[in-house]
Image: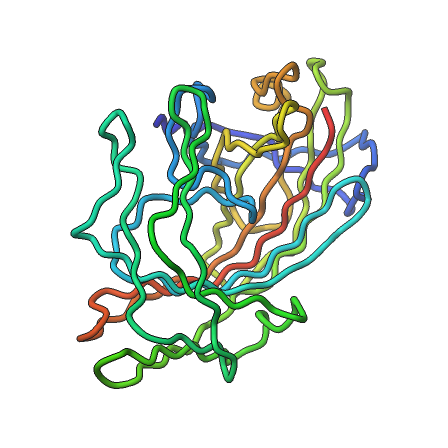
């Protein structure tokens, strides 16, 4: 994967509406980082690809994942929300390979019971997806503990406790620290496929955070509606960014029907436990915003 660093224009303007055409903007230079995720969409292999939250997932380098996710999806003027939690216990001694002998993940196991506050998480199959010679493959690699929120805002509440009650050993609890919820909007100028097509992303900055924000530019396939990641961008968390046309034009319109901008904030921590070894704790707020091209 290539890492490209260059200057991009940061827009200083009043907040636009969700589908507003913007003109007469004042620009200011700002340095960002762009990571090219998918130079050849039909050939690359990604464990879990571009999942339902809009975030690319990678092969785990830890034994236990405990995640808490709040998601907003905005498309054609409609915004939906959902929240959920996943706990996955990986067996790093049981790798999973594709037919090309490339590592795509690890088997996952049931080691006990998982509680989300006072609710018991459901045990579901743990599936991973990847591309192999341009064809999407799905396979079950074990189990995961999942909790789905009746009210999506529940996962944004402070002091959420996730507990693990092992078959053998003592109960272990984890308090999840929440990030500031991300709320985004976008405006465009120009028409898709033309040289002057640009998108201005706006969001609520988090002045108490790291000062950086990451988001992903992906697209939805015309033939099956699957989402595919193209770029990961890191910029200052100051609330506004212009995405120029030379980036957007690289997404082929004959194969993709919409561009999806995925803004996300996350809190990450780790823990060591005699029963679980290394534990990766992830809380994230995600906002997917789509536009047709």
Residue at x 53%, y 43% (from the top left corner):
215
Q: Quadrant of the C terminus?
A: top right
Judged left or right of residue 181, residue 59 is left
Determine the image quadrant of residue 58: top left
Q: Nearer the viewer, residue 230 or 30?
A: 230
- Quarter holding residue 291: top right
Front residue of this view, candidates 22 and 7: 22
213 sits left or right of 63 in the view: right
> Residue 143, how many percent across, how many down?
37, 58
- Which quarter of the picture shows residue 180? bottom right
Q: Is residue 227 above or below residue 153?
A: above
Q: What number of labels is visible? A: 0
Instruction: Report the residue at 42% width, 78% height from top.
Output: 175
Q: Check the picture and name the quadrant holding the N terminus.
A: top left
Query: In the figure, 281 relative to 120: above or below?
Result: above
Q: Is residue 199 above or below residue 267?
A: above
Color scheme of the displayed model: rainbow
Above or below 64: residue 240: above
- Give the residue at x 74% y 42%: 75
Query: Residue 17: x and y, percent?
Result: 82, 44
């Amino acid at each position: 994967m290539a890492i490209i660093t260059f200057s991009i224009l940061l827009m200083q303007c009043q907040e636009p509406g969700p589908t507003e055409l913007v003109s007469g903007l004042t620009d200011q230079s700002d340095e960002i980082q762009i990571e090219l995720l998918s130079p050849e969409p039909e050939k690359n292999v990604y464990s879990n690809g571009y999942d339902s939250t809009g975030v690319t997932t990678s092969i785990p380098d830890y034994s236990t994942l405990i995640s808490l996710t709040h998601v907003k999806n905005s498309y054609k003027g409609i915004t939906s929300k959902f929240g959920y939690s996943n706990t996955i216990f990986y067996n790093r001694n049981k790798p999973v390979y594709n037919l090309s002998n490339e590592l795509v993940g690890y088997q996952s196991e049931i080691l006990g019971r998982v509680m989300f506050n006072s609710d018991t998480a459901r045990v579901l199959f743990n599936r991973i997806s990847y591309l192999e010679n341009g064809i999407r493959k799905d396979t079950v690699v074990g189990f995961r503990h999942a909790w789905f929120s009746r009210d999506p805002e529940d996962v944004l509440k402070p002091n959420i406790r996730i507990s693990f009650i092992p078959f053998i050993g003592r109960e272990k609890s984890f308090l999840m620290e929440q990030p500031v919820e991300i709320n985004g909007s976008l405006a465009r100028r120009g028409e898709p496929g033309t040289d002057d097509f640009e998108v201005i992303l706006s969001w609520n900055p988090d002045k108490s955070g790291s000062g950086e924000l990451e988001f992903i530019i992906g697209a939805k396939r015309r033939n099956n509606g699957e989402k595919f990641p193209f770029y990961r961008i890191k910029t200052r968390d100051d609330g506004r960014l212009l995405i120029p046309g030379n980036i957007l034009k690289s997404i082929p319109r004959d194969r993709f029907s919409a561009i999806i901008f995925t803004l996300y904030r996350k809190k990450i921590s780790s823990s060591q436990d005699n029963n679980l070894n290394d534990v990766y704790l992830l809380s994230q707020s995600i906002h997917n915003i789509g536009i047709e091209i």
